[in-house]
Amino acid sequence: MELNLRKNCRYAIACPTSMGVRITPDNRMAVHASNHFYMQATSAESNVLNVASSLGNECLVLTKFVKGSPIAQFIKNDLRSRNINFEGVEVDQGGPWGYRHQFNIADSGFGMRAPRVWNDRAGEVGTTLSADEFDFERIFGAEGVAILHISGLIAAMSRSTTEFCLACARAAKEHGTLVSFDLNHRATFWKGREEELHAAFHEIASVADILVGNEEDFQLCLGFTGPEAGGKDLSGKIESFKGMIREVKAKYPNAKVYGTTLRQVISANEHMWGCLLHADDEWCVEEPRNIQVMDRIGGGDGFTGGLLYGLLQGWEPAKCAQFGWATGVLAASSLNDYAQPADEKQVWDIYAGNARVQR
């Protein structure tokens, strides 16, 4: 593959992110009907890092913390347990109505009762992230980062995080770090900022080496009109996405890898799951297969994490797509919203459909 990965880096993958916590009810109950919850540290970007970090690679999140907060301590402890390093200044809470870490409140759904997610982000400390809080020369220069991963969620969260992500992308390119960009459009983040965010996303996409997103992401974030949508038929979505990427390649020729997931929801517990990857002028298509789902949130991040891990290993595109498909399944088979592989074999067994007991 035509990717020029920087050698001898301390960090395999780094990402800007705003860390928070996610709480989910026990036993797939609905949020409003529950009084027992499971809490985990979370962010879309750190979830992508989790595949590489679980498999022994040193990774880094660039974030921000509330000083003295037990939630901040919980997040730090959780990241350490996941082999993810962190850097970020600590700021005073500023009283009960000051800064805090976001709460993501979600249930997993069951059968025909769909999962529901409620984001509570008022006063989120991560919205104030700024480039002057980090030593980019040390991080990207002296220590080195192979891949910088940016999500459209953090890039669109606030004016401050938009500028921060732009600064991260510029520093990465200056020091030979590859840039991965998952467009991840969220309408609530874009409302009233469309012109500003189109310009920012265009700049990041222009320097990105890896672009991830579905057809709608490319249309809404980067302004493509695209071919007719494929509707609910997944074969139609495959052909529609291929047509979209031909347009994207013409406008953003710096990117060498383009990827997306394919999902058809049969029930909250059962999905058809596939993925597409375009690299080296070839299409790698993992046709959708039936999978069982414990909690769907994080499946896309699991795919991206597996894809980036494969690229770090220097694998051929088809092998990267297969691994990403399987790490997406792994994330969906966990109550956590990230994939946490025990080893590569576990991932390849998932891909092969081998669920026999391992003794």
Image (cartoon, rainbow, N blue to C red):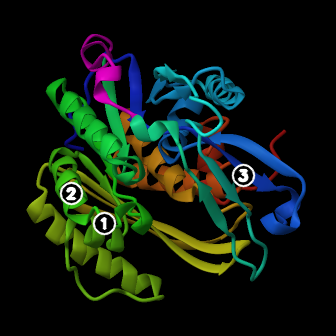
Relative to 179, is 305 on the left or the right? right
In the depicted structure, whether residue 236 falls above or below residue 47: below
Magenta run includes residue 303? no
Q: Position of residue 18 (x, y in %)?
A: 49, 39
For label 3, the SS is loop
Of labels 1 and 3, the one closer to you? 1
User: Which of the numbered marks, if any, corresponds to residue 196?
Assistant: 2
Considering only order in the chain, which callout, 3 or 2, is on the residue closer to the N terminus? 2
Query: What's the amino acid at mark 1?
Result: Gly
Magenta region: which residues?
Answer: 129-143
- Along the viewing direction, whichever of 71 and 55 lies nearer the viewer: 71
> Mark 3 highlights which residue?
334
Tell me the amino acid under the disc marked 2: Glu
How far apart are labels 2 and 3 at the CA level? 37 Å
**Taking 270 as reference, is 352 left or right?**
left
Q: Main secondary structure of the magenta part?
A: helix
Task: Give the distance between the C-alpha atoms of the residues marked 2 and 1, in whole angstroms.
Answer: 9 Å
Separation of marks 1 and 3 at Cα, in angstroms: 36 Å
Q: Which residue is mark 1?
A: 192
Residue 183 lies, in percent from the top left, at 34, 57
